[in-house]
């Protein structure tokens, strides 16, 4: 359900991004995308790792889930004022136009709705995707309609900010009503849960801030050391990477509680679930990388217009980063489940330093392409360090290691490689972009089944909605 709904919302997101990019232009979109990045960095402090910890503990203690979720809501509401003030201060320092400043202030004022969004944890713990996907769809549809109206009427960043704040508020309201109908009891914070939530959340939160920083600081560096134009080019293709996060989010939102509930009582189930997640992530991310390598130019030209053609070389690079990011979602959840959040902090510090230093060196030299390659290098370093920690913690036996062989992932890589070769031949003979998309949608599933990267049993399991899992 999540994948189908998120694919539809991804399509809307691509359309909206194309409209906003074309409407604001390179410089205007550079300011808009930079403002969103800065606000998202500061807004992370309203979560600060608490939701991940609450999911882990509530999955292990279902009888206390309302206390854990109530504690998250309470702490998020407490943090609203300082986070909002920090957002305002950051944008006052960074704005390059009056319109950028006003739009940023509107988005900062809308942050209080973030506290209510924690009610979505109730649905995640029940592996119930209906309400979260309904909320996502409502926000996407309203946002698309608003953007179309603003573009037609010739509105600017300020109207876009008003529309974004209103659509987010509408989604939060629907989610709150659905949560109220789901449970007769409203989640209330418990003093017994507040203290461990803060204690465990501090390590996860600081690490999460650093992860968000090294993942998004490149946009700010391109904006500062380059220009609004370069930031606009990079922000356009990076937005495609952002939209693609629906893949790991869909899989981990459903299976993160399963991972948490498996440890430490059912080690074998933890390993089975982790392997399944890795295989599912490989199927989607490898195929996306193959398509990006071949079709980056026509995709950018079609979606963003000829004015953004110079951004196309960054898309395949970010496609490689997407593969690593997908696996990073899995390792992050495993580190959290294995209670290695303090070690995660050291990895995040190293990644941030590595990313900032690399971007400061490369961006003035090769522009936003350097930022894209630093994203790949940073994600690769983080993944290797995280896997090393996980292997040390699990102390896998030879039998367990033999069960984790990457057989299906290697076959998935082969299927993606063949797909890329087929699409490249089609591109050389000047096949239209629409035909490339249709060929990819038809050929990739066929290759996955032919090379036994997927089987009919996998499809039957999904169609049964896990009844026999």
Image (cartoon, grey):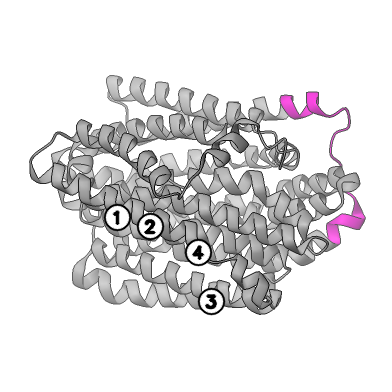
**Residue beneath disc 4:** 406
**Residue 413 bears which disc, if any?**
2
Residue 191 belongs to the span the image colors magenta: yes
Q: Is residue 387 above or below residue 9?
A: below
Q: Position of residue 441 (x, y in %)?
A: 33, 35
**Residue beneath disc 1:** 417
Whole-angstrom CA distance, mark 1 to mark 2, is 6 Å
Q: Quadrant of the N terminus?
A: top right
**Residue beneath disc 3:** 385
Whole-angstrom CA distance, mark 2 to mark 4, is 10 Å
For the magenta stretch, what is the residue range? 177-195
Horizontal side of 206 relative to 377 (left or right) equals right
Q: Quadrant of residue 111?
A: top right
First in sequence, mark 2 or 4: give its number. Answer: 4
- The reply to whether callout 1 and callout 2 are in contact (CB within 8 Å) is yes
Q: Is disc 3 placed on a helix, strand or loop? A: helix
- The reply to whether callout 3 and callout 2 are in contact (CB within 8 Å) is no
Which residue occupies 18% across, 40% down? 301
| In-front residue for pair 14/159 | 14
Q: Is disc 1 placed on a helix, strand or loop? A: helix
Whole-angstrom CA distance, mark 3 to mark 2, is 23 Å
Q: Position of residue 364 (x, y in %)?
A: 23, 71
Q: Is residue 177 visible?
A: yes
């Amino acid at each position: 359900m999540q994948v189908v709904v998120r694919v539809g919302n991804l399509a809307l997101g691509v359309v909206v991004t194309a409209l906003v990019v074309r409407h604001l232009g390179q410089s205007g979109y550079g300011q808009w995308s930079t403002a969103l990045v800065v606000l998202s960095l500061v807004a992370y402090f309203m979560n600060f790792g608490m939701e991940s910890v609450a999911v882990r503990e509530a999955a292990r203690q279902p009888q206390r889930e309302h206390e854990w979720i109530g504690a998250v809501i309470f702490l998020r509401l407490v943090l609203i004022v300082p986070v909002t003030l920090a957002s305002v201060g950051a944008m006052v320092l960074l704005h390059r136009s009056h319109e950028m400043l006003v739009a940023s202030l509107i988005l900062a004022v809308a942050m209080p709705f973030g506290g209510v969004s924690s009610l979505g944890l109730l649905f995640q713990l029940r592996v119930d995707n209906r309400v979260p996907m309904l909320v996502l769809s409502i926000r996407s549809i309203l946002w698309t309609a608003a953007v179309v109206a603003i573009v037609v009427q010739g509105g600017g960043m300020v109207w876009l900010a008003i529309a974004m704040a209103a659509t987010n508020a509408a989604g939060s309201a629907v989610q709150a009503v659905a949560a109220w109908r789901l449970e007769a009891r409203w989640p209330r914070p418990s003093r017994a849960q507040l203290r461990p939530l803060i204690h465990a959340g501090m390590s996860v939160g600081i690490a999460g801030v650093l992860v968000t920083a090294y993942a998004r600081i490149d946009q700010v560096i391109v904006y500062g050391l380059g220009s609004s134009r370069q930031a606009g080019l990079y922000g356009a293709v990076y937005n495609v990477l952002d939209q693609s996060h629906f893949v790991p989010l869909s899989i981990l939102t459903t299976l993160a509680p399963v991972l948490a509930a498996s440890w430490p009582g059912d080690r074998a189930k933890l390993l089975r679930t982790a392997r399944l997640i890795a295989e599912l992530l490989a199927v989607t991310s490898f195929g996306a990388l193959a398509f990006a390598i071949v079709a980056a130019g026509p995709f950018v030209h079609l979606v963003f217009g000829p004015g953004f053609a110079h951004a196309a070389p960054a898309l395949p690079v970010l496609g490689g980063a997407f593969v690593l990011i997908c696996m990073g979602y899995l390792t992050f959840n495993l580190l959290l489940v294995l209670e290695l959040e303090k070690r995660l902090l050291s990895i995040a510090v190293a990644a941030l330093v590595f990313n900032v230093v690399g971007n400061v060196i490369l961006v003035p030299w090769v522009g936003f392409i350097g930022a894209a390659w630093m994203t790949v290098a940073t994600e690769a370093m983080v993944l290797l360090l995280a896997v090393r920690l996980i292997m040390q913690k699990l102390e896998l036996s030879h039998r367990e290691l033999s069960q984790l062989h990457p057989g299906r992932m290697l076959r998935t890589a082969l299927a993606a490689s063949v797909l890329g070769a087929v699409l490249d031949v089609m591109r050389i003979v000047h096949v239209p972009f629409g035909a490339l998309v249709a060929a990819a949608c038809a050929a990739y599933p066929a290759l996955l089944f032919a090379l036994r990267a997927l089987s009919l049993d996998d499809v039957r399991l999904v169609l049964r909605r896990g009844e026999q899992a």
